[in-house]
Amino acid sequence: MGKRDIVVIGGGISGLSFAYEAASAGLSVLVLERAPRLGGCLSTHRTKEGYWFELGAHTCYNSYVGLAALIDGCGLRGEVVPRARTHLRFLDGDRLVPGSNMALLLRLFSWGQLLRAMPRMLAEKKDGHTVYSYYARVVGRRNYGDVLGPMLSAVISQSADAFPAGMLFKSRAERRKDFPRSFTMRGGLQAIAEALARRPGIELAMGKAAARVEVAGAGYAVVTEDGERHEAAVVVVATGPGAASRILRDASPELATQVARVKESVVETLGFAVRAEKLNLPVSMFLVPRDDLFYSAVTRDSVPDPSWRGFAFHFRPGQTLEAKIGRITGLLGLGRADLEDVVERRSVLPSPVLGHEDVVREVDRLCAGGRLCVTGNWFAGLSIEDCVNRSRREWARVAALTSPS
């Protein structure tokens, strides 16, 4: 096959952010994506009626300054839509616990435990702590187990207990005051991925799974599972750690070994739309179960529609479709026929543990000075902005080594 300046493996926000920066510098970029659609965790389902709902990431903030720059660069500023005020709610079985947001959390906490833990709340540092060890100390073990733990696990759609405490709820000093504090896009967040991919200089190859990267002279070659070979001066691996480790094994065994240290978790999402008049559920952007088949349910109530409401239930792996639909209809008081545009999505998410920063340091050391780049949602954090920032740093590292062919 033809030679490009850069081949990017992975068409999610990480890979497309890198591709956009490189194409903006005049380089030719080929993006290989194994799925039939772009976006990765930016996964918007659109119905024939013009309604949409998210199956993956659902919220952006004006502290995402890297993402905001990409939105501006793609000419999407006019498509930014503010999100309505959030209503986080807890479930106790099929019962919706009264109240929402911080007032609800404070009401659910045991105040005796909270008062005993309060001295640690001000002094405790996150360094060296898991999410469980840190938050159980600052709110009390029972408060963590009954309230905060389920909420944090709902946020990342997997057990949060073993996560490094410093990787959740980062404070970002800089904000784009000209953007809404919390926002989405008029056509859903996948619109960002689609706009990035339209940048001149970017070529897309959908349904093309990379099998391996090989050293090819002063550059690299990416071999796809169907036998195609694409050579480039720079190769960017922008996939989950499991796939990245397999792809990198031939070109850099030591790098592949380090990447393989990052664990992964599977979440199974079931999304659907419901005609608004069929639901009695109050406005609820985020539903948190305490112990259930699913980690969380995210709605489209943040961008209200007079006719439709949309849901994405993020299930623990291993449930049948019948079990998922039965749980949803039982909870919402609906019939099976009330669920329209039902769609399933399986995601593999990174599950970092303590010592993750050492893995990242080793990955950076092994990539330093070379033309092999690794990016994704498993470096500084899982957010969209973490992905964008990692890709921009990797681009800055190799930009001086690369010139248009």
Image: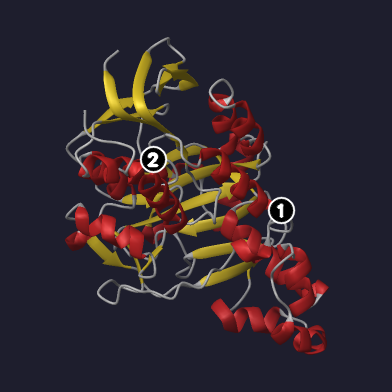
**How many neighbours does mark 1 have within 10 angstroms: few (below 14), some (14-19), or many (20 or more)?**
few
Query: Of the residues shown, which amino acid type is indicated by label 1?
Result: Gly
Circle 2/circle 1 CB separation < 8 Å: no
Q: Reply above or below: 341 against 180.
A: above
Q: Quadrant of residue 140?
A: bottom right
The percent position of residue 9, horizontal first and vertical second, equals 42, 31
- Residue 92 seen: no
Amino acid carrying label 2: it is Gly
Residue at 44% across / 76% down in the picture? 173
Q: What element carries label 1?
A: loop
Which residue corresponds to mark 1? 355
Q: Distance between the residues labelled 2 and 1?
A: 25 Å
On the image, the x and y values in percent for residue 315 come to 61, 46
**In the image, which disc is placed on residue 129?**
none
- Judge whether 121 appears above or below 34 on screen: below
Question: Residue at the location (53% across, 54% down)?
Answer: 382
Q: Which residue is painted at 34% across and 46% down in the image?
A: 17
Report helix, strand or loop for mark 2.
Answer: helix
Quarter of the image for the C terminus: give it.
top left
Identify the image quadrant of the N terminus. Answer: top left
Image location (x, y in percent) of residue 329? 56, 50
* Residue 124 showing in the rendered view: yes
Residue at 23% x, 40% y: name it: 23
Residue matched to label 2: 15
Q: Specify few, some or many for label 2: CA neighbours under 10 Å numbering under 14, 14-19, or 20 or more.
A: many
Number of residue marks: 2
Q: Where is residue 44 in the image (x, y as percent from the top left)?
A: 36, 46
Viewer-side residue, 327 vs 372:
372
Q: In this view, does 388 lie to the left or right of 251?
A: left
| Tag nearer the camera, 2 or 1 | 1
The quadrant holding residue 143 is bottom right
